[in-house]
Amino acid sequence: MALPASQRADKVLRYLVGLTAIIVPLLYILSDAVEVVQGGHSQASLALTYLGEAPTVFFILGLHVVQRPRAGWLGLSGAILYGYAFIFWAGFTLHGLFTHASDLPAMAASVGALYDVHAVIQVVGGALIGWSVLRAGVLPRWTGVLLMLGMLAHVALSPLGLSESYRWIASTTQNLAFVGMGLAVVFGVRAGARAPGAATWCG
């Protein structure tokens, strides 16, 4: 028996969210790897970074919808904060592309305190998302733990002024967490009493 149009659209949207949550973080991991190998930024690596940032708000909010209502206000708050931070990072990266910035310190200096403010927003948002995933039990709980570990790594490594190769550890950890969430959505992996596809987009 054919599914109603609303259910078919709901299923398509869930798959789009899942696929985006897989592909976009992998692009970000690739861009970080290119920067580590090159020893810094290039126009090509910044272009890859932009592709790994611009769609983030879509899959972050989509992953929250997939977990409704169990993710609650905690998950929504985290999704809004994290998504907003990546809207800024996408614009930040475009700025670097258009100005041909030579390295990250030069790019950060060009926006002043906004860089640190949005880094904090990202970490807080990511931690809230990770905790909400752990509590909701809709997506695999290990992905929530991995995301929180990624946020903790950012906090621990950022003040040390380490090279890109060390900061890549934190970035890769958080992005692998999202890849895991995306795979769970696409393949319908359960992490509790509620399947990832149980929530709808309209209510």
Image (tube, helix red, strand yellow):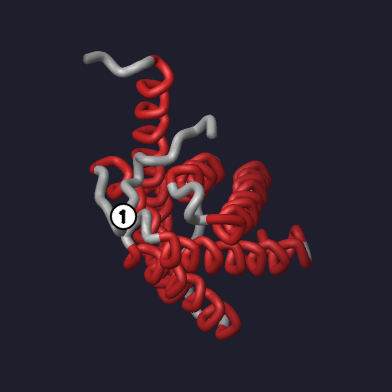
Instruction: Name the residue nearer the viewer: 99 or 58.
Output: 58
Name the kind of residue labelled 1 in the image.
Ala
Instruction: Name the residue nearer the viewer: 104 or 114.
Output: 114
Q: Secondary structure at mark 1?
A: loop
Residue to which mark 1 is pinned: 193
Quadrant in the picture for the N terminus: top left
Q: Quadrant of residue 5?
A: top left
Position of 146 relative to 101 (above/below): below
x then y, percent, for residue 73: 61, 56
Q: Is residue 122 visible?
A: yes
x then y, percent, for residue 84: 65, 50
Q: Relative to residue 162, is residue 88 drawn left or right?
A: right
Say which residue appears at 34% left-offset and 50% top-offset. Answer: 194
x then y, percent, for residue 100: 62, 48
Position of 16 relative to 109 (above/below): above
Q: Residues within 10 Å of mark 1 (few under 14, many from 20)?
A: few
Position of 173 relative to 2 (above/below): below
Say which residue appears at 59% left-offset and 50% top-offset. Answer: 83
Instruction: Name the residue nearer the viewer: 37 or 174.
Output: 174
Q: Relative to residue 117, is residue 7 drawn left or right?
A: left
x then y, percent, for residue 54: 55, 42
Quadrant in the picture for the C terminus: top right
Say which residue appears at 58% left-offset and 68% top-offset. Answer: 123
Q: Relative to residue 191, is residue 9 drawn left or right?
A: right
Q: Quadrant of residue 142?
A: bottom left
Q: Is residue 93 visible?
A: no
